[in-house]
């Protein structure tokens, strides 16, 4: 009896061992994009429309009859396009937006083309191909909203107009059957969107506000408000001081909803009585901006989504039926993020997207009559949540007491103790932030055995205007110290092994990586800079940001307004302070963090006779999109980390010769031996 | 088309607790007393309608849970022809429909068992054909005598934002 128990115990132990060995899944798991995109219920609930990536790489938009589960209509298209939006025009017709695969992210960018198809497979048409005479080339566009049964209002802007340009936009009426486009007006201010109100008497839409940008600033918002006498009042807000941005009207037209950051640093959603001007704050969180608000069929707000630690729907009215539905769904899917993807017109059925740190997402239908959820489709059936690392929200206080949040991803099957750690600062830096959820980059690194700490250092977006704007001009200073403090937090709490810590990031994250090595030469055992900024003075005159007045103003503010200050806060001119092995990766067509940044950093390291490695991506801009490039990049990265903080680190070991991808030219990789100033 | 769909929203189905439909399945539909919900305690007709809908959903969920029923495919009634015209003309009414759920989840014996008026019978066919399309998650045992109550009620003309010509507007809702 005892003996057999022992045998069983041994078997269990062996089972555990083999499990921990198997904890690594093939890296391909993380490279495949999700197979279903933008699934939407038809207004009458009889059909589902979605986009799907075929194994051939072709994109496929289709409509499924829910009763028979048969495909009733489809369109296929080749090329590097993805379904960026699916919109039901009515019960019989679907409008599909196609976007180009975006850099850096796994989604698809702005709409390049708009296609329509009927549920019976007829009337398949290109409705918008991104060609007008206004800009003489390819234009981007955005759906603003329905105008009537056949027409939509769309906003057209020149393509490639990223953060560096704020053009005037054209508002068109687009017929969703014929594709006939009629220009209605040019926006009166730059990059403006109209705020519309439907007249109850006539059913006509009236534009009451325009919300746009100023030519000389990234951080200003200009609001035009129509006054009683028909004239327009213009107010320019500075984001660092606070703004009041109109967002839209209640369906009865009685309330105007406004996003307010004047009365406090974080954003509040405020409702303003159109007649009396009386105001009520619907919701504000003291630490973070509101991500999304939820309304019921009466237009009453029942919840607010915030991303403080984990994504959380704050219930505003416990008695509200939909709030109770939300809580019920949360109970069914603990530790997962629940999003309402679409609803039927009578809101009897909801299409629900459920995702987590361990899975990119599955669709379910929630039926209000039986209160139960039915599985529809798995967007990534090759991802087994049981094999995935876990991401925890963490918080610590920086050296000056400021609360800093972050996300710690722990390898599967490991305790958060004495682990090799990679600090992963996000790009931006001002505006973007990290959130909890599926993140293939964090999971690739954790899958290879590293704990990953993504830090929302000060200057990040989402935590209110002070948290972001107070730290313009503090690159490499307090912003950097937050990353250092995060590293010490992980070491002092026993999570990280002090001898096995590296830092890696892209764009600003590449800057923070090299600055980390400059400022904390003994803390990081290695660093990888990807499409990084390495000399703030180079940033002042290269790249697309410096091309515009608004960009120049931003750079003066964010990077520092004197050459001396910028030099002191740059890694390349301070390369002599770097002790640790460096790996630089850069797209040769990068116009955001211009390739020149790579050149000056490389030359500075060469001058120091420092040992370092480089990987160039000849056809990539600010981040590689191509799968074979990304595979080589991650293979090189994992090899680099392995040599420096892996299971058996050996900084003198030669780089892997095994990172080429079959059928493509290997990306140029160089190893500069130097004299090896490693400690 | 848009208009019709909007009107469709006014069709409210209610679960009948009291009616034991199993014995009535084979009999003709009986005329029963019915009154549209009283909306005077609400601040608007829309709120009243949504409250009735919510109350119904809560009851429905309890009832279906107790019967072990769960939708695989739910189809809304699509009002066409006479029933579409009746909706447009705002003919009010209540209908009780009884049906069985077979082991494979399909519905059978779908019949109108009670109706509030002769005029309201016009909706019967539409409701029966929608329920005929329903599929439930397969069951261990057939469930007999499920009843579904559908109420169709409309805002009184005088209470509307803009009543028709010749109808005097009155205040119907509480502030």
Image: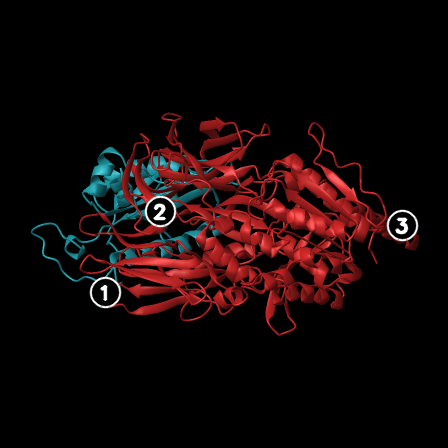
Chain colours: A red, B cyan
> Mark 3 vs mark 1: same chain?
yes
Q: Position of residue A333 (x, y in %)?
A: 57, 53
Tell which circle, 2 or 3, labels the residue nearer the N-terminal end: 3
Q: CA distance from mark 1 to mark 2?
A: 32 Å
| Disc 3 target residue | A7
In this rendering, would A16 be left or right of A115?
right
| Disc 1 target residue | A275
Looking at the rendered structure, the secondary structure element under dot 1 is loop
- State which chain disc 3 sits on: A
- State which chain disc 2 sits on: A
Labels 2, 3: front one: 2
Q: Quadrant of the rendered structure where residue A678 is?
A: bottom right
Q: CA distance from mark 3 to mark 1?
A: 79 Å
Q: Name the residue nearer the viewer: A593 or A394.
A: A593
Q: Position of residue A403 (x, y in %)?
A: 60, 70
| Disc 2 target residue | A168
Looking at the rendered structure, the secondary structure element under dot 2 is loop
In this rendering, would A328 be left or right of A184?
right
Check if mark 2's residue and mark 3's residue have beta carbons within 8 Å: no
Tell which circle, 1 or 2, labels the residue nearer the N-terminal end: 2
In this rendering, would B66 be left or right of A457?
left
- State which chain disc 1 sits on: A
Q: Name the residue nearer the viewer: A470 or A99.
A: A470
């Amino acid at each position: 009896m005892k003996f057999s128990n022992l045998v069983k115990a041994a078997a269990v132990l062996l089972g555990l061992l083999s499990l921990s060995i198997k904890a690594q899944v093939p890296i391909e798991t993380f490279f495949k994009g999700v197979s279903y995109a933008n699934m939407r219920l038809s207004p009458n609930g009889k059909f589902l429309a979605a986009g799907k990536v075929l194994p051939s790489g072709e994109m496929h938009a289709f409509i499924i009859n829910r009763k028979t589960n048969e495909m009733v209509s489809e369109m296929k298209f080749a090329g590097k396009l993805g379904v960026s939006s699916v919109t039901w025009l009515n019960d019989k017709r679907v409008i599909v937006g196609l976007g180009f695969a975006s850099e850096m992210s796994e989604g698809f960018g702005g709409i390049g083309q708009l296609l329509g198809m009927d549920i019976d497979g007829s009337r398949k048409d290109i409705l918008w191909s991104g060609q007008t005479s206004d800009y003489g080339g390819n234009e981007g566009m955005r759906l603003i909203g329905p105008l009537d049964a056949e027409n939509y209002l769309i906003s057209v802007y020149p393509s490639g107009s990223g953060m560096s340009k704020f053009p005037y936009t054209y508002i068109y009426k687009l017929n969703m059957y014929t594709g006939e486009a009629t220009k209605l007006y040019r926006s009166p201010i730059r990059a403006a969107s109209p705020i519309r109100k439907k007249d109850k008497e006539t059913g006509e839409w009236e534009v009451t506000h325009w919300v746009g940008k100023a030519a000389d600033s990234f951080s200003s918002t200009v609001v035009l408000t129509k006054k009683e006498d028909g004239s327009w009042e213009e107010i320019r807000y500075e984001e660092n001081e606070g703004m009041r941005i109109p967002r839209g009207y209640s369906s009865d037209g009685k309330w105007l909803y406004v996003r307010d950051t004047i009365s406090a640093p974080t954003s509040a959603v405020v409702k303003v009585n159109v007649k009396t001007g009386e105001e009520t704050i619907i919701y504000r969180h003291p630490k973070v901006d509101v991500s999304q608000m939820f309304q019921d069929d009466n237009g009453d707000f029942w919840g607010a989504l915030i991303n403080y630690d984990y994504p959380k729907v704050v219930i505003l009215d416990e008695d509200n039926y939909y709030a109770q539905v939300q809580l019920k769904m949360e109970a069914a899917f603990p530790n997962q993020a629940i999003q309402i993807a679409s609803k039927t017109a009578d809101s009897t059925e909801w299409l629900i997207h459920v995702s987590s740190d361990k899975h990119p997402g599955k669709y379910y239908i929630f039926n209000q009559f039986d209160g139960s959820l039915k599985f529809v489709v798995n967007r990534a059936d090759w991802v087994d949540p049981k094999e995935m690392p876990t991401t925890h929200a963490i918080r610590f206080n920086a050296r000056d007491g400021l609360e800093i949040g972050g996300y710690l991803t722990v390898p599967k099957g490991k305790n958060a103790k004495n682990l090799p750690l990679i600090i992963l600062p996000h790009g931006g830096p001002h505006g973007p932030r990290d959130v909890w959820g599926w993140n293939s980059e964090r999971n690739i690194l954790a899958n290879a055995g590293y704990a990953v700490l993504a830090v929302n250092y000060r200057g990040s977006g989402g935590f209110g205007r002070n948290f972001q704007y107070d730290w313009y001009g503090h690159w490499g200073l307090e912003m950097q110290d937050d990353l250092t403090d995060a590293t010490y937090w992980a070491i002092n709490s026993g999570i990280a092994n002090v001898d096995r810590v590296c830092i890696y990031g892209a764009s600003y994250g590449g800057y923070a990586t090299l600055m980390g090595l400059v400022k904390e030469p003994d803390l990081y055992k290695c660093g990888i800079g990807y499409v990084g900024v390495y000399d703030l003075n180079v940033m002042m005159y290269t790249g697309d940001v410096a091309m515009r007045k608004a960009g120049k103003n931003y750079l003066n503010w964010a990077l520092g307004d004197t050459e001396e200050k910028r030099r002191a806060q740059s890694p390349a001119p301070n390369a002599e302070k770097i002790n640790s092995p460096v790996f630089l990766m850069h797209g040769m067509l990068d116009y955001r963090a211009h390739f020149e940044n790579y050149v000056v950093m490389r030359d500075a390291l060469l001058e120091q006779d420092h040992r370092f490695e480089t990987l160039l991506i000849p056809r990539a801009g600010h981040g590689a999109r191509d799968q074979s490039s990304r595979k080589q990049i991650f293979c090189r990265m994992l090899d680099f980390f392995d040599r420096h903080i892996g299971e058996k680190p050996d900084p003198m070991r030669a780089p892997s010769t095994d990172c080429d991808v079959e059928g493509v030219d290997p990306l140029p990789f160089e190893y500069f031996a130097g004299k090896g100033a490693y400690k | 088309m848009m208009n019709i769909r909007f009107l469709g929203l006014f069709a409210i189905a209610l679960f009948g607790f009291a009616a034991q439909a199993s014995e009535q399945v084979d009999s003709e539909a009986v005329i029963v007393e019915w009154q549209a919900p009283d909306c005077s305690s609400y601040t608007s007709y829309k709120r009243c309608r949504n409250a009735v809908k919510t109350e119904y959903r809560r009851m429905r969920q309890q009832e279906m849970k107790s019967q072990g029923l769960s939708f695989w495919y739910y189809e809304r009634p699509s009002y066409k022809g006479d029933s579409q015209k009746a909706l447009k003309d705002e003919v009010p009414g209540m209908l009780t429909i009884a049906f069985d759920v077979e082991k494979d989840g399909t519905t059978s014996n779908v019949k109108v068992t009670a109706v509030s008026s002769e005029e309201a019978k016009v909706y019967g066919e539409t409701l029966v054909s929608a329920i005929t399309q329903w599929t439930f998650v397969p069951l261990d045992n057939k469930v007999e005598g499920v009843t579904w109550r559908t109420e169709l009620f409309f805002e009184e003309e005088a209470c509307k934002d803009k009543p028709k010509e010749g109808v005097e507007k009155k205040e119907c809702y509480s502030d």
